[in-house]
Amino acid sequence: MTASSDITKEIKQRIESAIQDSQVEVISGGERHFALKVISKSFENLSPVKQQQMVYAAIKDLMAGNDAPIHAIDKMDIRIS
C-alpha cells in the first residue's frame, strides 16, 4: 500500500466519522493534493461556506505544518443526500 493510498483512506475515514451519514470519495491528485466528494444530509440548510468548514474541520490536523500529508484540497464537491 502506498503512502498516498494510506492518506486517502485516512481522509475518508476522518470525514465519515466527523460528518454523520456521509459518503466520501477522495481522489489523489499527486504531490499531497486531493479532490473530495462528500454527500450528507448534515449539509441541509447550511451555507456552502459552513458545509466546507465541516469538511475542513474533520481533516485540519492533516493539513497543519510544513510536512503535512495534505498540502491542498483542489476541489470539493459537496452534495446533500
Image: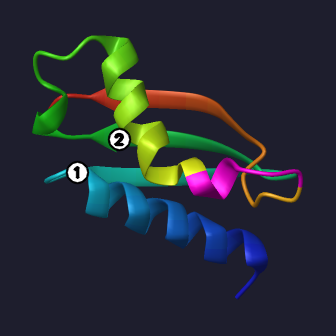
| Membership of 3 in magenta stretch | no
- Residue position marked by numbered label 1 in the rendering: 22
- Residue 39 lies left or right of residue 6; in this view the side is left
Residue at 78%, 45% in the rendered image: 71
- Quarter of the figure that contains the N terminus: bottom right
Q: Quadrant of the C terminus?
A: top left
Secondary structure under tag 2 reads strand
Instruction: Give amino acid for label 2.
Output: Val
Corner quadrant of residue 15: bottom left
Spot occupied by residue 60 in the image (x, y as percentages of width and height): 56, 48
Left or right of residue 14, residue 69 in this image: right
Q: Which residues are magenta?
A: 61-66
Q: Nearer the viewer, residue 61 or 38?
A: 61
Density class for disc 1 (Cα within 10 Å; few <14, some 14-19, many ≥20) is many
Which is nearer the N-term, disc 2 or disc 1?
1
Sort mark 2 into few (<14), some (14-19) or many (20+) by Cα contacts within 10 Å. many
Q: Are marks 2 and 1 in contact (CB under 8 Å)?
A: yes
Residue 26 in the image: state x and y as whole percent. Answer: 52, 53
Which residue is drawn at the image coordinates 14% and 53% (left, top)?
Answer: 21
The residue where tag 2 is placed is 38
Q: Name the residue at the top extreme.
A: 47
Q: Amino acid at mark 1?
A: Ser
Q: Is residue 73 above or below residue 69?
A: above
- Frontmost residue, 42 versus 28: 42
Please give the name of the residue rendered at 75% of the width and 61% of the height, measured from the top-left corner: 69
Alpha carbon distance from label 2 to label 1? 7 Å
